[in-house]
Image: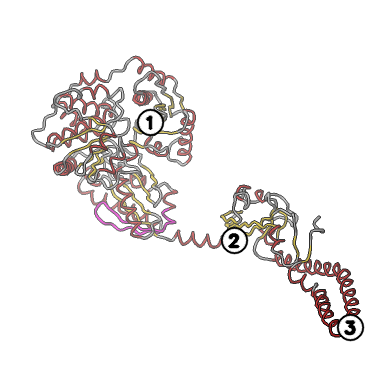
């Protein structure tokens, strides 16, 4: 069929038929001659007949010969082209429409270490080149992407070659009714370029700031004559370590250092998980308190100044998370290292006084105050919100607490403020009401949370020009940006403790009502697990302030008694716990008949820590189409970094996360996978 459909066309066809066209011209001339001279016309007619006979016989005889000559020439020309392609230094192959190799050149065979007759799928050589990436399969005629083979990096260019179009575009032959296509594959070696780019990237500068967390406290713990020796040893340790990384360390202040180094050295630091954090702690000349440092590093910025800005942001995050850790900030993500030590509580309340005065000035010039905590609020966020409501009341400003869902644990607290003459009917409002009521001269106070995505009303953050953040959770990569005032203290036991301190500096004559004092006291009690975790001197001072203002321990205790269903749900979660790797307790709290299953889950996680040998506990609670994870530990495991890997956060020993679109089994598997990964990386003990 193919032979019958092949015909001459174009200029070659016209050239071969030109003699026949000339014969037709002679016939026209012969007609004119007949009009002039009859006998001359006869002579010319005889010649024309002889001429046309000769031409037709030659055309029929020579056509196969010419076709054979053309085929022979094309074959020889193709052989030359094929030889050139075979010897081409660029790796090149032809594939069929299924991706099977049908022809290769010498460079390609040398690269993949295969013989000339290799006819398997290209995927067998390059697993990343799957069938769906082939041109024609994905709707494109030409594709390009990066591939790796052995130690080399290549750019693979693939182009669809239609055989029908090749025939149609030919100037010599035409083919009808033929379909099909081939794929041309070219591989451009980018290995040397990638190595050069990597080397240039590795030589770029990284900027870091190193702060001593507890400089003054450590010096106070050693006798005066040895203080200069302690600072010298710390400085020597830091300088020696940075010098070993081929970096430069410059002391800015007594407890602050500026560091620059090559990116390659910074990556080595990351690979070593910033072991400088632990090395500094070994400096001991009799000081009772180990010195800890915080490191903030900026990488991959567009300029050195941007890297420095990244480093400043990173050190702020490290200090906000409690210190004794390193934070590496890059344009796309933030990485955390260390953070295994509990932050030391500051005995001075100077910072609380300064923040209280700043908050007072902000609220004083605003028309109204909106207060909100985190989504599915707890007693601590409610107590802190009530405290800020009291601050606004003391400053004669209208205030509203944004609260959507009232859980069973919070219901008794909310009822203490509803239907009371002392409190307005719009003391508690929901999201839609807040967005409708908020004015241009309003201040929003966010308590007990610093992640905008999990606040009660994220849209309200965009509507308010003035935002104040008061929180005791460690900061993560997601923060509330452009806050007018940010007061985040990771050492504080609860948001209620922080607000209790602020209240003492708002007004000398400020007096809390009993229900307000009870609510804030409850927040401290719940977040400290009855004053057993994260409890410091200032925690008891805050509790004493609330007690003096009418907080009643007996009333608070009655508010938090469990009903029978909650007690059984908690007992079931504890009894069904799985002990993973001998030290991690994992269980599920279904809470089908419980009004606040997430609260019961958190209580069960606390109960699991009472089992001997358990370092951390994890309770998964399905609620409202999501899975809430409550993570708890005492002192050996930092559950915050575990939960951060799962998209959550929290404290060193109290943290949590929320999983969407998953089952309980998938959630348990995710926790185990995270633990296994962190143990393999050396961040957790096995």
- Please tell me the numbered disc located at residue 268: none
Mark 1 Cα-neighbour bin, 10 Å: few <14, some 14–19, many ≥20: many
Q: How many marks?
A: 3
> In front: 112, or 464?
464
Left or right of residue 361, residue 436 in this image: right
- Please tell me the numbered disc located at residue 38: 3
The magenta stretch is 246-266
| Residue drawn 40% across the image and 21% down it | 574
Task: Give the residue number, with chain letter if any, for mark 2.
Answer: 189
**In whole angstroms, how far apart are the C-alphas of marks 1 and 3?**
120 Å
> Residue 288 in the image: x percent, y percent?
26, 40
The verdict on residue 260 being magenta is: yes
> Residue 351 in the image: x percent, y percent?
19, 43
In the rendered image, the vertical position of residue 595 relative to residue 111, given as above or below: above
Magenta stretch mostly in which secondary structure? strand
Task: Give the residue number, with chain letter if any, for mark 1.
Answer: 631
> Residue 139 in the image: x percent, y percent?
60, 51
Mark 3 Cα-neighbour bin, 10 Å: few <14, some 14–19, many ≥20: few
In the rendered image, the vertical position of residue 596 relative to residue 293, given as above or below: above
């Amino acid at each position: 069929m193919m032979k019958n459909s092949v015909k001459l066309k174009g200029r070659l066809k016209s050239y071969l038929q030109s003699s026949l066209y000339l014969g037709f011209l002679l016939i026209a001339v012969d007609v004119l001659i007949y009009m002039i001279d009859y006998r001359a016309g006869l002579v010319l007619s005889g010649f024309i007949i002889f001429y046309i006979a000769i031409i037709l016989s030659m055309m029929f005889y020579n056509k196969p010969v010419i076709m054979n000559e053309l085929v022979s020439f094309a074959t020889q020309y193709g052989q030359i082209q094929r030889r050139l392609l075979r010897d081409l230094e660029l790796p090149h192959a032809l594939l069929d429409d299924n991706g099977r190799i049908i022809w290769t050149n010498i460079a390609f065979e040398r690269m993949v270490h295969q013989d000339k007759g290799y006819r398997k799928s290209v995927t067998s050589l390059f697993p990343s080149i799957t069938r769906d990436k082939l041109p024609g399969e994905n709707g494109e005629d030409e594709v390009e992407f990066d591939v790796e083979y052995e130690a080399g990096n290549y750019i693979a260019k693939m182009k669809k070659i239609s055989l029908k179009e090749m025939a149609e575009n030919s100037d010599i032959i035409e083919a009808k009714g033929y379909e099909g296509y081939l794929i041309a594959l070219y591989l451009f070696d980018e290995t040397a370029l990638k190595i050069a780019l990597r080397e240039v990237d590795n030589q770029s500068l990284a900027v870091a700031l190193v702060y001593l967390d507890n400089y003054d406290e450590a010096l106070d713990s050693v006798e005066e004559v040895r203080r200069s020796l302690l600072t010298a040893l710390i400085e020597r340790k830091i300088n020696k370590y940075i010098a070993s990384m081929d970096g430069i360390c410059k002391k800015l202040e007594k407890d602050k250092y500026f560091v620059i180094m090559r990116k390659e050295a910074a990556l080595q630091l990351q690979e070593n998980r910033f072991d400088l954090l632990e090395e500094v702690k070994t400096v001991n000349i009799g000081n009772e308190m180990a010195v800890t440092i915080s490191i903030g590093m900026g990488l991959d910025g567009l300029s050195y100044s941007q890297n420095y800005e990244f480093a400043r942001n990173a050190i702020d995050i490290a200090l906000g998370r409690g210190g004794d850790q390193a934070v590496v900030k890059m344009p796309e993500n933030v990485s955390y290292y260390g953070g295994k030590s509990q932050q030391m509580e500051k005995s001075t309340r100077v910072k609380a006084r300064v923040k209280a005065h700043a908050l007072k000035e902000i609220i004083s010039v605003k028309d109204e105050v909106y207060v909100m905590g985190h989504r599915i609020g707890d007693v601590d966020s409610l107590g802190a919100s009530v405290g800020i409501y009291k601050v606004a009341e003391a400053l004669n400003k209208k205030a509203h607490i944004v609260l959507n869902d009232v859980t069973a644990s919070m219901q008794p607290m909310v009822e203490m403020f509803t239907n009371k003459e002392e409190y307005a009917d719009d003391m508690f409002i929901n999201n839609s009401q807040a967005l409708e009521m908020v004015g241009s001269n309003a201040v929003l106070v966010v308590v007990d949370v610093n992640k905008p995505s999990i606040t009660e009303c994220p849209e309200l953050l965009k509507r308010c020009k003035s935002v104040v953040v008061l929180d005791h959770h460690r900061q993560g990569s997601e923060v509330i940006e452009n806050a007018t005032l940010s007061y985040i203290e990771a050492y504080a036991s609860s948001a209620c403790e922080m607000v209790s301190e602020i209240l003492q500096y708002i007004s000398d004559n400020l007096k809390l009502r009993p229900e307000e004092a009870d609510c804030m006291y409850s927040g401290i009690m719940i977040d400290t697990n009855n004053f057993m975790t994260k409890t410091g001197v200032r925690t008891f001072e805050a509790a004493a302030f609330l007690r003096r203002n009418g907080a009643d321990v007996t009333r608070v205790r009655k508010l938090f008694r469990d009903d029978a269903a909650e007690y059984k749900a908690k007992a079931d979660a504890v009894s069904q716990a799985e002990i993973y790797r001998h030290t991690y307790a994992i269980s599920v709290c279904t809470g089908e008949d419980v009004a606040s299953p997430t609260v019961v889950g958190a209580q069960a996680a606390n109960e699991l820590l009472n089992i001997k040998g358990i370092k951390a506990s994890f309770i998964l609670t399905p609620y409202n189409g999501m899975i809430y994870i409550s993570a708890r530990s005492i002192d050996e495991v930092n559950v915050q970094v575990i939960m951060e890997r799962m998209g959550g956060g929290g404290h060193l020993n109290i943290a949590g996360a929320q999983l969407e679109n998953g089952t309980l089994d998938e959630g348990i598997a995710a926790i185990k996978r995270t633990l296994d990964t962190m143990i393999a990386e050396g961040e957790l003990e096995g």
